């Protein structure tokens, strides 16, 4: 299905991406062949005040950037969760893309598998995915989504340090996802044999916090906004993952190889919108809070508190290093280690840096 119409591009810009992806293949099918519920879309129109705030937030290096003309293009961004202020970047990206002339919208799905099915079915164009998802489902990652982790690794009073983990119970939501990658990385960097730590599936983030407080588990990963709830109860903040594992990303921007080959300029525009959204996040709290309330509801006060937490974790660095083959490769290695993937295909099958490099060059990003 043709999902967008790009504007005329230089032949070099199109040819470069086409050459990179000419050998891209679908690695495997995602999920079952069953149909999913019709996606729910939330369209975002950029208001003049928001657009002005974003323009003001741009650093001097981007002053010479000429936004693309996306008139006639359609870009649908899928998120595997209900609207949440932590995902405000997609609201900002949608507003930016609309201000450049595109028909842009955010589609919310319940869970990552549903989000992947929507992309594969042609009902969305791009979305936030993990390396393991790209490899397992035959998608391609082409830019950053959340380049830094905002998790903390917490220990019970009986676990004062990571070295004290052996013999204790670690709780997780799953044994093959992002938490598994973070845990494997943490154990390896601290020379801890995984067999010495008991692993138990203990539910989602908020459930695990309650399990920690009740003494059912001794260690777990929590979101940054839950740290104080545990530290005030004498639990230990053992690791801030954005500091301990800066090479690990929470998620990447992904799509089908067919879409990125058919619309190379739109892939570049999505990365450019991400850069501008990241610049806005890092320099304009009010613009981010306004977008967060518009996207997910809630109060400006709560959104402001979350903003401070995410900013402290450096979750959206507006720099070229926000997306790299080294980071993606490191996560592929960890995914293989925890059996999140069963094979390691050629990187060209699931990764391209070409749109990102072009976006970085166009916006003079350091």
Image: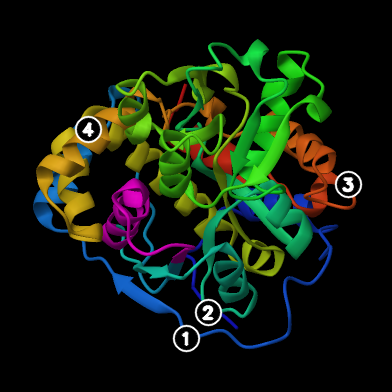
> Mark 2: which secondary structure?
loop
> Mark 4: which secondary structure?
helix
Q: Which residue is mark 1?
A: 38
Look at the numbered discs 1 and 2 and tell me whether their residues touch, using CB distance below 8 Å: yes
Left or right of residue 118: residue 63 = left
Residue 89 in magenta stretch: yes
Q: Position of residue 156 (x, y in %)?
A: 50, 23
Q: CA distance from mark 4 to mark 1?
A: 36 Å
Q: CA distance from mark 1 to mark 2?
A: 9 Å
Instruction: Specify the segment rendered in magenta.
Output: 77-99
Residue 113 in magenta stretch: no
**Disc nearer the start of the sequence (4/1):** 1
Q: CA distance from mark 3 to mark 4?
A: 40 Å
**Disc nearer the start of the sequence (1/2):** 1
Q: Is residue 137 above or below residue 254?
A: below
**Residue 9 shows up from this direction:** no
Q: Position of residue 182 (x, y in %)?
A: 64, 32
Q: Which residue is mark 4?
A: 57
Q: Position of residue 265 (x, y in %)?
A: 53, 57
């Amino acid at each position: 299905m043709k999902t967008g119409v790009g504007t005329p591009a230089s032949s070099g810009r199109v040819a470069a991406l086409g050459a990179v992806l000419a050998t891209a293949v679908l690695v495997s099918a995602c999920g079952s062949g069953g149909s999913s519920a019709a996606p729910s879309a939330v369209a975002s129109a950029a208001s003049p005040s928001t657009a002005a705030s974003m323009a003001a937030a741009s650093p001097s290096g981007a002053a010479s950037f000429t936004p693309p003309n996306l008139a006639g293009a359609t870009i649908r961004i899928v998120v595997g969760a209900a609207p949440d202020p932590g995902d405000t970047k997609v609201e900002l990206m949608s507003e930016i893309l609309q201000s450049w002339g595109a028909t842009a919208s955010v589609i919310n799905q319940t869970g990552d598998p549903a989000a992947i099915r929507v992309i594969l079915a042609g009902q969305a164009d791009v979305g936030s995915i993990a390396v393991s998802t790209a490899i397992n489902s035959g998608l391609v990652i082409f830019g950053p989504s959340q380049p830094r982790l905002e998790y903390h690794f917490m220990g019970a009073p009986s676990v004062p340090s990571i070295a004290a983990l052996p013999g204790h119970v670690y709780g997780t939501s799953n044994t093959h996802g992002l938490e598994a990658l973070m845990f494997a990385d943490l154990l390896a960097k601290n020379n801890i044999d995984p067999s010495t730590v008991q692993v138990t599936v203990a539910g989602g983030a908020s459930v695990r916090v309650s399990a920690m407080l009740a003494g059912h588990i001794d260690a777990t990963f929590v979101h940054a906004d839950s740290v104080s709830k545990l530290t005030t109860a004498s639990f230990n903040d053992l690791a801030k993952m954005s500091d301990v594992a800066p090479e690990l990303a929470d998620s990447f921007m992904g799509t089908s190889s067919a879409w990125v080959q058919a619309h190379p300029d739109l892939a570049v525009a999505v990365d450019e919108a991400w850069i501008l959204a990241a610049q806005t996040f890092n320099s304009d709290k009010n613009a981010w809070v306004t977008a967060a309330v518009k996207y997910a509801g809630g109060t400006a006060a709560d959104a402001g508190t979350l903003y401070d937490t995410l900013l402290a974790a450096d979750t959206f660095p507006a720099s070229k290093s926000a997306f790299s083959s080294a980071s993606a490769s490191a996560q592929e290695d960890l995914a293989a280690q925890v059996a999140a993937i069963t094979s390691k295909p050629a990187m060209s099958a699931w990764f391209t840096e070409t749109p990102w490099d072009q976006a970085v060059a166009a916006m003079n990003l350091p």
